[in-house]
Image: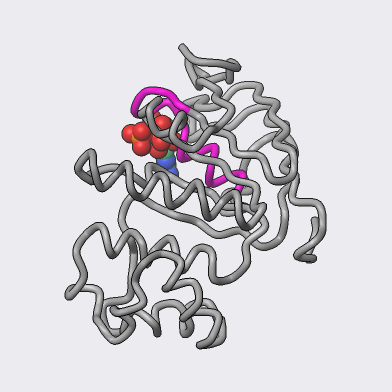
Amino acid sequence: MSDSAFGDRAVHIRIDGKRFGDTAVLGSIALDVASGRTVAITGPSGIGKSTLLRIVSGLDHDFEGEVRAPARISPVFQEPTLLPWLTALDNLTVVTGAGTEEAERVMQTVGLENKQAHYPHQLSLGQQRRLSLARAFVSNPELLVMDEPFASLDEQKADEIMALTRRLIEDSGVTAILVTHALAEARALGAETFHLSGQPATLTKGIV
Ligand SMILES: Nc1ncnc2c1ncn2[C@@H]1O[C@H](COP(=O)(O)OP(=O)(O)OP(=O)(O)O)[C@@H](O)[C@H]1O
């Protein structure tokens, strides 16, 4: 575990098994993500992608094996999960504890410098996604975990947000793990790709 902005941001995953009751969802999974690398995990619906991400994020400890990940983890989900009663700027500062100056800087980076006083419902879906990305980066994460973050956007908006995400990842040096159905998203982020398949699911390197 590291709590330093300059510490080791690597992720070490050794899962021997994960069950929900009688159902073995994940089998034996070994994956090391080096500091600052982006990895994508693809696979069909229901295979165990989100389950794996929850384990890596430290939200689920009920599995066999060992996972080591940095301390500061920022999630990005399919839904922007913004607080509707807070302005865009307050969604960054109140929720993360970040200072106003830092929040304003990140809002500018994501192209929302004119929207600080807007509430989430006054933003388009694409702008809400940008704000959600800004929130993920404002707390200077060591690990970014993304669960289908580009779903339900039209192709052009998805392309824009993927390019922005890639730039933010590269500029910040964060380690990133993306789970997605879509290979195009993995490619757009320049991610090393793994495929989850079988029951219980195991990981294969490369594109399937
Ligand atoms: N809390 C839970 N209790 C019981 N079963 C669960 C629980 N969470 C997930 N599962 C089951 O584990 C399996 C994997 O679910 P998971 O959400 O990880 O799949 P996924 O690959 O992320 O799917 P999708 O792409 O549709 O989001 C599914 O069969 C699901 O029903």
Q: Residue 6 magenta-drawn?
A: no
Q: Residue at x 49, y 15 (%)?
A: 207
Q: Residue 47 magenta-drawn?
A: yes
| Picture quadrant where residue 91 is located | bottom left
Residue 129 percent location from the top left of the image: 33, 59
Q: Nearer the viewer, residue 14 or 206?
A: 206
Q: Is residue 130 left or right of residue 14?
A: left
Coloured how?
A: one colour
Indicate the quadrant of ligand 1 in the picture.
Answer: top left
Region of the chain picked out in magenta, as a range: 42-56
Residue 102 percent location from the top left of the image: 55, 80
Q: Is residue 102 left or right of residue 188?
A: right
- Please say if 179 is above or below 124: above
State how many labels appear: 0
Q: Is residue 148 left or right of residue 98?
A: left
Residue 49 percent location from the top left of the image: 47, 34
Q: Residue at x 49, y 34 (%)?
A: 21
Q: Residue at x 80, y 56 (%)?
A: 1
- Please say if 202 is above or below 19: above
Residue 134 percent location from the top left of the image: 45, 66
Q: Residue at x 80, y 59 (%)?
A: 2
